Amino acid sequence: MEVFYYMVFGILGVVVAATELSKSNKDRIHTSSTFNSFKNNYLFVYSLMMAGDWLQGPYVYYLYSTYGYGKGDIGQLFIAGFGSSMLFGTIVGSLADKQGRKRACVTYCITYILSCITKHSPQYKILMLGRILGGIATSLLFSAFESWLVAEHNKRGFEQQWLSITFSKAIFLGNGVVAILAGLLGNTLVDALALGPVAPFDAASCFLTIGMFVILFSWTENYGDPSENKDLLTQFRGAAVAIASDEKIALLGAIQSLFEGSMYTFVFLWTPALSPNDEDIPHGFIFATFMLSSMFGSSLASRLMARQAPRVESYMQIVFAISAASLLLPIVTSFLVAPSKEKGGSISFAGCIQLLGFCAFEACVGLFWPSIMKMRSQYIPEEARSTIMNFFRIPLNIFVCIVLYNVCYNS
């Protein structure tokens, strides 16, 4: 079965390379050198930020377990992180519109670095503080950077269509190339160099520090609504009114929350789906395969958004349909393929089919991110962009906390 993993990875690698290299003039948007310089600066910073995030992901649970904490305690730490993102993150993220998006991006770096530092302590209270800081940082990562980019892009007078280039490249690099390289670096630090499970967090701090200095010295500040007479409550009320009064904004929030909710559920459950009988599966290699699939999706998104037709709203319907079908595969295969009762061994035939379906889902994730970013840039009002984007994450975080609770305490 090992050949199967290499075959899937190899085919995906060829497909991604062919998709990127075969782009014609119709698939490319011609831009100015000034825009390219601006875009490359943002992509460099965004890649560093995502490196800081991806380096930590695979080792958080492992680190807590090495400190001697059980599933219940670790579950509480994870729930605290998402709860923090929902409560404190919404407030801090929303301050970006008033206090400045550049300042919010720097705050993200500082907050996440402090969160990484807490990982050196085995004390539960310190680790809990780290999860709370990490939750705040996550809210800033998924709102402040995009808000700064959209405002700065428009302020500099670049064409609206050029935004789609930055969005698709950010996902291709940040959620694809950087994710794979971060996984390899983390594996080298922990296994090859035997530096321990805290080493990836220290490496993440280094990347975040470099990115913070680039932001400080090369980015300019921009705001949503900097009026002095607006307090945070008024800002929240204004964002709520904008969502309630514009059906498109409300639906956009629902689309984002529902898709991301399925995405986080997938993150928690793909391992037990592929190895229900404790089959021996190469988690790191499968993760890299998923990231390749995501890269294919973002590459495809850049082609689609470079053309006048189809519109984002049209092809996103197909993306959702394929995503739903992909995630139905574990249920379908359980009926069509007789489940194996043998413990251990290699991945089953049903697992192979599910893996291919999961790769299709990850390709949809790669399509989803730049497309939803483009839709947000079109429909969300500039003066409350960060606030509304953080409002969108409230139902998502509630959903994830419920799923986590069920996974940790009822399994």
Image (cartoon, rainbow, N blue to C red):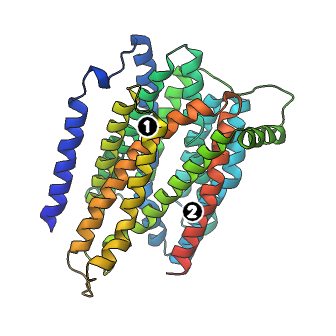
- The percent position of residue 46, horizontal first and vertical second, equals 46, 35
Q: Is residue 247 visible?
A: yes
Whole-percent x, y for residue 225 in the image = 74, 27
Viewer-side residue, 26 vs 121 = 26
Image: 291 above or below 373: below
Q: Specify the label residue 400 is tagged with.
A: 2
Q: Quadrant of residue 223?
A: top right
- Quadrant housing the N terminus: bottom left
| Distance from Cα at disc 2 to Cα at disc 1 | 26 Å
Within the image, what quadrant is residue 309 found in?
top left
Q: Amino acid at mark 1?
A: Leu
* Camera-side residue of 156 and 331: 331
**Residue 224 badge:** none
Please report contact status of discs 2 and 1: CB closer than 8 Å, yes or no.
no
Q: Is residue 396 above or below residue 233?
A: below
**Which residue does the image show at 47% across and 25% down from the upper left?**
163
57 left or right, relative to 5:
right
Q: Is residue 75 above or below residue 384?
A: below
Location of residue 237 in the rendering, given as x and y in whole percent from the top left corner: 81, 41
| Type of amino acid under label 2 | Val
Dot 2 alpha-carbon crowd within 10 angstroms: few under 14, some 14 to 19, many 20 or more: many
Q: Nearer the viewer, mark 2 or mark 1?
A: 2
What residue does disc 1 label?
48
Sequence-first tag of 2 and 1: 1
Q: Secondary structure at mark 2?
A: helix
